[in-house]
Image (cartoon, rainbow, N blue to C red):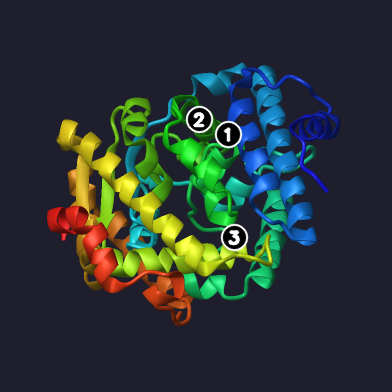
């Protein structure tokens, strides 16, 4: 079994019954990714089948997006305003902060089912009932294949989710080296200009906003650790946004993320190596944070800092402070929405998750040393 870019493209065209991809810039990241999947990922039989289906589906979405824009040119005139882009080391309280902010009636975010199925299906009603049911079933399948994942990260099919899942359709996202062992792809991505990918992210937000008229007048709050890899591009593309950076000690954050990657990667390969994963993500995050610090030094007025401890201990105070930093006034409706989500989050809370740095070939002393430049600056 081998993956082929040409075969994937032809399969997508046949399924979409449309053949106009538009700008073919995406072929470079797709080609790098497919080669790494073939050469490095050590896919299981099931992993290969799921990967081939997913790549084809994402290409179909690219084609369907172009067809929808062609049939409805007003979509490209939809004004997208982004208030905040949340990022930081993985596992730093960003999910809680994201979902609290998304609860505000002044803001909106991408929802899990939308990230899986962002485009309307034929003969589907305005409530998107077909896509929602498919997303619900897909979430159940995902958790059955990775039963420990729910203890690591709370997932809900109808709640706010990371917009990096939309960027997956550009084949330019850290999702790929999080779900697969593809280090050459990760190395390539570090030096790749992501501006066209972020231009497409804006187009996906336009489509979601065009479909849901209740979003008119609301600003978006985006969230993903991926945005750490393209801070300059984020600030250029969404010129009025601020980057909200969540902070936590690397001695907790890095092993925690390595454990998440191990759970995700094991769905696609029977040979996921935890120590290999730990070392890779340790080095990846160090390099990423150093580049991020350079951007921050040049554009300091575009950043808001949020310590993990504050988010966990005082979530309502923290979200109100962030809203103020974004230039938004917190009213009674916001406060009620925050309180309502706090109740929901208590019900969603996942179980305990045990791991050590040593499980992933790391140590507390080494993490403190490697990330000293970051922790001394922000913790």
For the residue carrying disc 3, how many other residues have a C-alpha within 10 Å: few (<14), some (14-19), or many (20+)? Answer: many
Q: Which mark is residue 170?
A: 1
Q: Position of residue 21 (x, y in %)?
A: 69, 22
The residue under label 3 is 157
Residue 224 visible to the viewer: no
Residue 197 tag number: 2
Q: CA distance from mark 3 to mark 1?
A: 22 Å
Earlier-in-chain disc, 3 versus 1: 3
Q: For numbered disc 2, what is the local secondary structure?
A: helix
**Can I make out residue 163 in this image?**
yes
The relative height of residue 65 versus residue 274 in the rendered view (above or below) is above
> Which quarter of the figure has residue 239?
top left
Q: Are marks 1 and 2 in contact (CB under 8 Å)?
A: yes
- Residue 158 image offset from top left, x and y in percent: 57, 58
| SS at circle 3 | loop
Residue 273: give x, y in percent of width and height.
56, 66
- Please tell me which of labels 1 and 2 falls first in the chain: 1
């Amino acid at each position: 079994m081998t993956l082929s870019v040409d075969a994937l493209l032809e399969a997508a065209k046949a399924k979409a019954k449309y053949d106009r991809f538009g700008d073919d810039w995406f072929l470079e990241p797709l080609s790098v990714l497919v080669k790494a999947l073939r050469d490095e990922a050590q896919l299981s039989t099931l992993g290969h089948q799921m990967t081939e289906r997913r790549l084809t589906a994402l290409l179909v979405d690219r084609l369907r997006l172009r067809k929808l824009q062609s049939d409805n040119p007003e979509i490209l005139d939809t004004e997208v305003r982004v208030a905040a882009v949340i990022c930081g080391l993985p596992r730093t309280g960003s999910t809680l902060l994201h979902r609290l902010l998304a609860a505000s009636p002044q803001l909106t975010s991408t929802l899990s089912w939308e990230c899986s199925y962002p485009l309307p299906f034929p003969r589907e009603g305005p409530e998107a009932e077909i896509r929602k049911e498919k997303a619900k079933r897909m979430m159940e399948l995902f958790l059955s294949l990775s039963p420990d994942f729910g203890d690591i990260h709370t997932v809900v099919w109808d709640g706010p989710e990371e917009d990096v899942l939309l960027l997956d359709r550009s084949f330019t996202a850290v999702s790929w080296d999080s779900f697969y062992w593809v280090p050459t792809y990760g190395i390539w991505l570090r030096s790749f200009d992501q501006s066209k990918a972020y231009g497409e992210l804006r187009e996906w937000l336009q489509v979601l906003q065009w479909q849901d008229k209740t979003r008119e007048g609301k600003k978006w709050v985006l969230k993903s650790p991926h945005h750490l890899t393209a801070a300059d591009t984020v600030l250029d593309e969404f010129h009025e946004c601020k980057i909200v950076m969540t902070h936590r000690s690397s001695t907790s954050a890095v092993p925690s993320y390595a454990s998440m990657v191990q759970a995700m990667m094991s769905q696609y390969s029977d040979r996921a190596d935890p120590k290999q994963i730990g070392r890779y993500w340790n080095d990846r995050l160090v390099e990423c944070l150093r580049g991020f610090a350079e951007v921050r030094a040049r554009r300091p007025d575009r950043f808001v800092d949020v310590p993990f401890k504050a988010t966990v201990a005082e979530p309502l105070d923290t979200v109100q402070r962030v809203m103020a930093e974004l230039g938004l006034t917190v009213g009674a409706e916001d406060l009620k929405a925050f309180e309502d989500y706090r109740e929901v989050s208590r019900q969603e809370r996942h179980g305990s998750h045990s791991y050590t740095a040593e499980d992933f070939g790391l140590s507390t002393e080494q993490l403190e040393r490697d990330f000293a430049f970051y922790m001394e600056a922000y913790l």
